[in-house]
Image (spheres, rainbow, N blue to C red):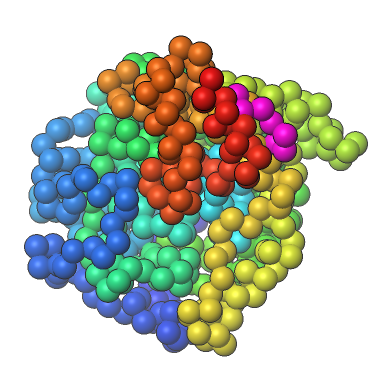
Amino acid sequence: MKHLSSLCLASLLLAGCVVGEIGEELATDQATIDWDTLPPVSAPEPELWSLPTREAQYRAFCASPRGDSFFRAVCATPRPNITDFASLLEVAKLDEHRAFALTGNSTSLVKRAVSAVNPRIIIFPRVSEMRERPAEMTALGFVRGEPFVEIVSRDLSTGDYNFYLFTFERQCDYEGGCDLASLLTEEVEHGWTAFSVYSEEDVENTSFDCRSCHQPDGHGTRKILRMQELEFPWMHWFPQRFVQRTESDRVLTAQFAEAHAHDAQYGGIPIATIQNAIDEGSGAHLEALLVAEGQSAQPNAFDPRIEAEIKAGPSSPTWEKQFAVSLAGDSISVPYPLVDVTDPALRAERTRSYLDVVTGAAPRQSLLDSRDLFSADAKVKLGLVPPPGASGRAVLTQLCSRCHDGRVNPALSRARFNVKDLDGMSRETKDAAILRLQEPATSPLRMPPWRAADALPPAELAAAIEELRK
């Protein structure tokens, strides 16, 4: 097997020359910066602003020992110097003997940002053809657009999984906030000045809560790894030439390659490796890891028959049945029944804008947002907006059940709002929910949170409020 190495310095320098203004941050050496000397972040994440950061969070985090390999590595003495994506991969022991897979449709925390133009990349240990469980297991999930990486690492003493939110800072965070170009281009993967690591307990009362997806049987039960498209044809995963080239590889790899033709890497993986991968990356490799970890039983898993049914007719009865499960709030949203989730016109416009900015043909301020490229059909079928004409109860059930279904830690404030028990909810809780439904789109108090769904259309918003007034 061909081992992957970190992107060489020459490649970074070349990237800086190619992208001009976008590459300026790449050459900055933050290795010797003392966290105590850094200025405050101009626009901190609203949901995390009350939590400690930098050294205070690092001390608190490392004071509660865990038995997984990532915890041991990040809490080593001296503190590891993580200044870019490559060094994070090295600390996580994913710089060699690793595999990766990209998806153009995610049902995770970051689903609103994910398409083949701006995919979610998962980087994980490469398992053998015999699908033997690796001695240690740490995996990273990342999509451009926000300064964080999701991490899971298996506890060697309990066999359970520990989930972490790794956030990082850059120079632009101290200068009024990072612009779109600094978040959506390769800049976001370099020049990290400080980092903070949060455990799943730290973030469980926020929309960053890992357990809402990874603990499907509720508070106190065993956590699982998630891959809803666990079987061939891995409909939204790419590249995919390891077992058999799939339609997702033909369509999504091409869309990705067009948008990132002038990038050096994505999620620390060289673009050339992603485009030409045969045995380094695929959905098949991720499936192999989950099988090796004993995680092949997935709630409401995407049925591989859906692809054939869609090709044979206008809809897929199998998908419709699975979609009904998510509409009822009994599972997270099921992936889209087609390979491509994007609106073609939006995708073409945003790809062109991205290429113009990274090549210097247009100013960075002109960059259009390459997230949220969904077609109107995909928005409904991915649960980003409710079906037109849905009742107020149906709206609340579909959009709120992921975090408010009565299975969360009962000690949390958000446990008071349970969409599965609307009739038993207190008047005070319902009134608070009505106010939060009407919060501005930019408010961290808005319900549903902006990462989870779009702002409710007027008719569906009115229906949800009416239901809560009963």
Residue shown at the point (43%, 65%) measured from the top left: 183
Q: Nearer the viewer, residue 347 or 141?
A: 347
Which quadrant holds residue 62? top left
Residue shown at the point (70%, 68%) measured from the top left: 348
Q: Residue 152: horizontal and vertical position, in percent?
A: 36, 38
Which quadrant holds residue 464? top right
> Compared to 432, does 197 lie above or below?
below
> Left or right of 5: which side holds 129?
right
> Compared to 425, does 247 lie above or below?
below
**Is residue 285 rendered magenta in the image?**
no
> Left or right of 103: which side holds 203?
left
What range of the chain is rendered magenta? 387-393
Q: Residue 417: horizontal and vertical position, in percent?
A: 41, 24
**Is residue 392 rendered magenta in the image?**
yes
Q: What is the count of numbered marks?
A: 0
Q: Nearer the viewer, residue 302 or 172?
A: 172
Q: Residue 33: horizontal and vertical position, in percent?
A: 14, 69
